[in-house]
Image: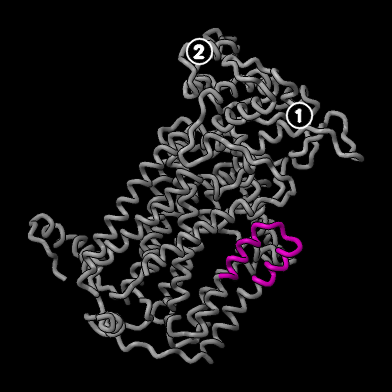
Amino acid sequence: MMTRVWFTAAAAATMLALAAPAFAAGDEIVLPKQKWSFSAPFGTFDRGELQRGFQVYKEVCAACHAMKLVAYRSLRDIGFSEAEVKAIAAANEVTDGPNDDGEMFQRPAAPFDRFKSPFANDKAARAANGGSLPPDLSLMAKAREHGPDYLKALMIGYEKPPAGMKVPDGQYYNKYFPGHLIAMPAPLGQEGQVGYEDGTKATIEQMSHDVTAFMMWAAEPKLEARHRMGIGVIGFLLLLTGLLIALKRRIWANVH
Amino acid sequence: MSLATDNKLIKWIDYRLPIFSMAQHSLIDYPTPKNLNYWWNFGSLAGICLVIQIVTGIVLAMHYTPHVDLAFNSVEHIMRDVNYGWLIRYVHANGASMFFVVVYIHIFRGLYFGSYQAPREILWFLGVVILLLMIATAFMGYVLPWGQMSFWGATVITNLFSAFPLVGEPIVTWLWGGFAVDNALLNRFFSLHYLLPFVLVGVVMLHLVALHQHGSNNPLGIDRQGPQDSIPFHPYYTVKDMVGLAVFLLVFALFVFYAPNLLGHADNYIPANPLVTPAHIVPEWYFLPFYAILRAVPDKLGGVLLMFAAIGILLLLPWLDTSKVRSARFRPVYKWFFWVLVADCVILLVAGGKPPEGFWLIMSRVATAYYFIHFIVLLPFIGWFETPLPQPTSITQAVLKPAQEKA
């Protein structure tokens, strides 16, 4: 009896879980499925991949896109040393103040600062980008359905538009973007656009994969801790369930 | 019923404030039907869900800022900078979903075994009040992160009140505290989202008082004939509830640790923007059946009224069900219609997540019509015309008979 009840409950929960993505709006765009080191239940981030991804972000994306929620100090988590983090931060000038004279002043960024945005405000960002606002990338990997698959597809999805489709000035055709017309030109246009220090070949495929992994880390920096804790919690609960079932049988033995 | 202790201090206190005798009376000695199955776990599970939500919610409130410019980032501050903030927030967010799963199962348990029938009508009413309070609380909670779905969900739902003639517009302005969904609304939603769970605790207490007046219904749906049909709540049902709790926590943990955003919506990781409407505004999954009913009606006011009626009709249930027999085990016809109703609600849930057009709009209309037909037409008629199966004369007889046959 009990097994049947819980089987039904589990089946219902599974159904629910399966149904959830199906609620997403119907669009005939099919994203290529990718393999991500972090997606499996025991998945972790690949430090090398994240550092390469950070390099792509820094040299390419950061020209237009902000990442306001990520602090330089958190780069320690992806394998940079304290000195490296200080150097990465210090390469940026930020405005601070007012000082004791009431003046704002410039200083090199420190590890406790958040990533410096490329534009002073949204209006400046729009003005520099033909009226379009390059969105903040801090949470981008969670802010789209199938985030990582979608982001990678988007970066390699630039193509010639189908015959008969007019692409207005300042727009580009992308087969994975909803509506297919995107204001962002292909960010990763050629092989070797970024010079990887670890010797990895910087193909477009590789760069888009690395930077997507980096965006996933930026959006969900506690993913590894979560996966790790989950193993312990679920292991404990399995044991507890077993013990409680045994205890329950023993206590109930004299009732039936 | 006297206190089973020799501890002088406990006796001294209890003589003046009988909290220990009350606990002994309602949690330990409390006579409970001996044949409750695991579907009876979901009541205590719902209570535990409420406690989990309150505890995690209080901690979240210590770090959250209810202001349109700061709310979204304060949630991210919890996720990134607060120690185990990610855990507390994911438990709270998924906890809401778990709470609704548990309560929906609890409600359908009541529907199957006729737990709303005399003398448990008021117990059932209080349950409906609990559901309404939960819906209000969950809706306001979803608004607090001030993401795109928060904002647009709040806009769509508060605008529903504009459907009422004459008073509609003033009501909406009053709810908003202004002329748009803005800071005033976020602030009051935070205030109410903090308040309502404690109101819930109060109604849950009344729900328990009503429950303990006549005791639990049971899978056979027959009244207890004497003490031989009951066992004390502790240790029998405390341990049985703990087995259920452990399994429930396993399912809960799978969501929290391995699919924390599965039941949410990606758009809510985009900060609220009044100038950009998301392509599809959908509520959380547990509201989808009601959303389907709302959109099934071409008239806005009609949709709103029907949506409220979908819950309101549950208040009439004790009289719409004309059967003299409680449990569906002895109701060969009702049993089937019960499962059709379950399927109907699942169809409404799926339809609520689809754009209201074509096939799914038709489905949601058919399913909405059937939902009301079930309660208004089928239930009374089944009760009148169905021939129930013979019921056992007592719980003990029914429990012992299969055991003796085996031996």
Q: Which residue is mark 2?
A: A84
Residue occupying image coordinates x 73% and y 49%: A27
Estimate the x, y position of residue B100 in percent, counting from the top left.
Answer: 49, 59
Question: Which residue lies most toward the top here?
Answer: A101
Image quadrant assignment for residue B200: bottom left
Q: Would you say B51 lies left or right of A187 here? A: left
The magenta stretch spans which residues?
Answer: B343-367
How packed mark 2 is, by other alpha carbons closer than 10 Å (few <14, some 14-19, many 20 or more), is few
Determine whether the residue tagged by mark 1 lies in a helix, strand or loop: loop
Residue occupying image coordinates x 40% and y 77%: B120
Estimate the x, y position of residue A227 in percent, counting from the top left.
Answer: 44, 38
Mainly helix, strand or loop, the magenta region?
helix
Residue type beneath disc 2: Glu
Q: Tell me, yes or no, whether the two marked residues, 2 and 1, touch with CB atoms within 8 Å.
A: no
- Residue B362: in magenta span: yes
**Viewer-closest of A88 and B23:** A88
Q: Is residue A59 above or below residue B78?
A: above
Q: Would you say B334 lies left or right of B149 here? A: left
**Viewer-closest of B282 and A203:** A203
Q: CA distance from mark 2 to mark 1?
A: 31 Å
